Image (spheres, rainbow, N blue to C red):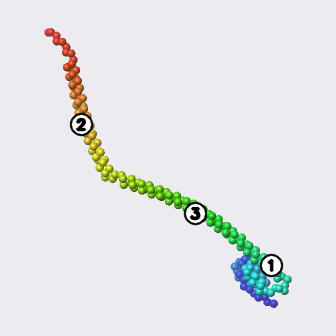
Amino acid sequence: MDEQKHALTLTGPAKVNGIHEPAGRTVTVSATLALQLAASGAINPDLAAQLSKALDLSDTLLESDFQEAVEDAAAGRIELLGVDHMLEIATLENQLFDLSRELAESSTAVATSLSDLNTARQRVTELERQIEQAPSITTLTADLANAVNRAVTAETASAEISGDLAAEKAARAEAERKLADATAPKPAKTAK
């Protein structure tokens, strides 16, 4: 009796008709071989369940064994997928934790930078106020020129005073000399 052939896509590598086939390859197999592939987990367990329902194996001793093998293979495959997903979830949770930490650090850095910026702006405002209150350069230049003129005038007056003082000292010395001459006893005149 010719068995019906089925086109199946392999979900795992398998040996079909003596040839090793990779996962993802579509192969045409008999229902019996399809059930064997399902039992080994090389095809989709849902498809294997459909194939097992399509075949009437009620009169064979292997029906319950085969059904159990298919269910075991499907359960193992589901468990394996669950473990893979748990690993992916753990990896994603670790990445989320790392990103949260980096975000917190970045937020702290931004807050610090904003605080520094506000402090700098306050300092600029204070300096601008001081500049507005300070005399202008023109006023300072005029004040400096006046101070220089006063210094020159004071220096000239000082020179004049020094000259007058020197003249007064000379006059005083002359007066003291004359006073000394006038108060000095005169020698007695001798007869000749």
Look at mark 2 in the image and give the residue it sits on: 160
Q: Please identify the quadrant where the C terminus is shown.
A: top left
* Gap in angstroms between the C-alphas marked 3 and 2: 81 Å
Furthest residue in direction left, as rendered: 192
Q: Which residue is mark 1?
A: 68
The three-letter code of the residue at mark 1 reads: Glu
In the image, farthest residue toward the top = 191
Q: What quarter of the picture does the N terminus occupy?
A: bottom right
Helix, strand or loop at label 3? It is: helix
Q: Quadrant of residue 35?
A: bottom right
The mark nearer the N terminus, 3 or 1, is 1
Task: Give the class, few, some or many, for how many residues have Cα within 10 Å of label 2's Cα (few <14, many ≥20).
Answer: few
Tell me the number on the disc at residue 37.
none
What is the C-alpha distance between the residues marked 1 and 2?
132 Å
Neighbourhood count class around disc 1 (C-alpha, 10 Å): few under 14, some 14–19, many 20 upward: few
Disc 2 is placed on an element classified as helix
Residue 119 shows up from this direction:
yes
Reading the image, the residue beneath label 3 is: 103
Q: State the separation of the CA atoms marked 3 and 1.
A: 51 Å
Residue 114, x across and y down, in percent: 50, 59
Q: Residue at x 19, y 20 (%)?
A: 182
Local secondary structure at mark 1: helix
